[in-house]
Image: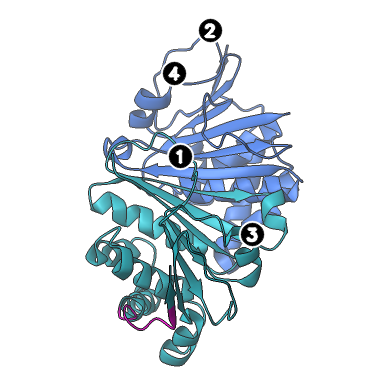
Chain colours: A cyan, B blue
Amino acid sequence: MKRTEIRLAGSGGQGLITAARIMAKAALLDGLNALQSQVYGAEARGGATKSEVVMANREVWYPEVLEPDIVAIMTKASFVKYGLKVKKNGLRIIDTFMVPEYDDHPDFKTVGIPFTHYDETQLKNRLSTNIVLIGYLIAKTKVVRPESFVKAIGDFFKDEKLSNNEKAFWLGHSLLGKEDRISG
Amino acid sequence: MKRTEIRLAGSGGQGLITAARIMAKAALLDGLNALQSQVYGAEARGGATKSEVVMANREVWYPEVLEPDIVAIMTKASFVKYGLKVKKNGLRIIDTFMVPEYDDHPDFKTVGIPFTHYDETQLKNRLSTNIVLIGYLIAKTKVVRPESFVKAIGDFFKDEKLSNNEKAFWLGHSLLGKEDRISG
C-alpha cells in the first residue's frame, strides 16, 4: 500500500483546514482515499495549529498522522512545535518569509521559499498563501495531479475567490526550481 | 477520561463538515479537546458520507471514531450504512423527513424528528438543516454549551448567513420534547 501523510502547520486564520480539505478532495478525484482531520484543543492553544491529510491507494486504516512524509511550516510557532517531526527521508517545506532562520537536518530534505512574499508581491494579498504553498507542494511531490487540485478548488470557492485561488495555485506550482535554499 | 464520539451521516452538500467543525470549535470554547475528521474515498462514493467529532476532557489519543455515542442520520443511504453503528445505550437521531421508516433497536435510544421539514417551513430553506439538527443534538445531549456553539458559528459565517444559522440552531434547540417518536 502506498500511503502519504501530509501535515500543514501554521496558525489559525491561514486557511490550513481549507487547503487540506481541497487536497483530500483532489486525492479523491485521483482515485485515492483520503482522511482529513484537525485537532482543536490544548495542542492548538499554544498558537501553533495543524491540519492533516492522509492519502492512500487503499482504505485509510490508520487515520492518524504517525510521522508525516511531508510537513509544511508556515509560522515560527509551528516550526518550533512541528519542525522536527518529519519522517526519515521526508520533506519539510518552510515559508522563509515567516521563518527566515532555521537549521537544516540531515535526516530529511528541507526546502525554503518565501511563499508569503510571493503572495504579497505577485497576487497583492496574503490570503492565499496557503494555496500558493500547496501549489508548490504538489509540483514538488506530485501527491495529486495539479488538474485535480484545481478542479477541487471549484468545490470550495466561486467567482473572484475561485479565480484568485487558481492563480495562487499556479503561482505556487511555478516556484519549483526557485527555492531559496535546499538541504538534506 | 470522559470521551464522546459523534458521527454526522448524510450526503455531500448537507454541510456535515461545517457542522462538525463548528461543534469542535464549541468544544474548544468549553475547555475540551476535540478532533474533527472526514474521509474522502471509496467509502463516500456510495452516496453516504460522514463527518465526525471526538471530544474529550483530556487529549484525544484515538482520533478515530470507534463506536459513536451519538449518530445523526440525515439520508436513507446514510441510514443503511451507519444506522446500526451506535454504541450500546448510545443515541441515534434521525431526520424523519428524509428517513420516514425505520426499525427501532433495543440496544440504543432512537429519536425521530423531521428536521428538514422544520427548516423548510419555519426558516424557508433547506440549507441550514445541518444546524437545526445540531441545535437539537446539543439540547438533548448537552455535549457542549449552546452559547459556545452559537459563538463558534461566528467563526464560520457572517452577516445574513450568521443570523440564519443562529436561527437554525435555536429552532433545533427548541425541538427538544417535540420528537415524532422516541424508542429504546
| Same subunit, tags 3 and 1 | yes
Determine the chain carrying the residue at label 2: B
Give the chain letter at badge 3: A
Q: Is residue A11 visible?
A: no
Q: In the image, what residue occupies the spot 25% across and 53% down?
A: A29
- Mark 4 lies on a secondary structure that is loop
Q: CA distance from mark 4 to mark 1?
A: 22 Å
Residue at mark 3 to residue at mark 4: CA–CA distance: 40 Å
Mark toward the viewer: 2 or 3? 3
Q: Main secondary structure of the magenta part?
A: loop
Badge 4 and badge 1 in a common chain: no
Mark 3 residue element: helix
- The crowding category of the residue bearing disc 2, from other C-alpha atoms within 10 Å (few below 14, some 14 to 19, many at least 20), is few
Residue type pointed to by label 3? Lys
Q: Earlier in the sequence, mark 2 or mark 4?
A: 4
**Is the residue at mark 3 from the same chain as the one at mark 4?**
no
Under mark 1, the amino acid is Pro
Q: Return the chain for callout 1.
A: A
Q: Nearer the viewer, mark 1 or mark 2?
A: 1
Closer-to-camera residue (A176/B29): A176
User: Which dot marks residue A63?
Assistant: 1
* Residue B41, picture quadrant: top left
Residue marked by disc 3: A81
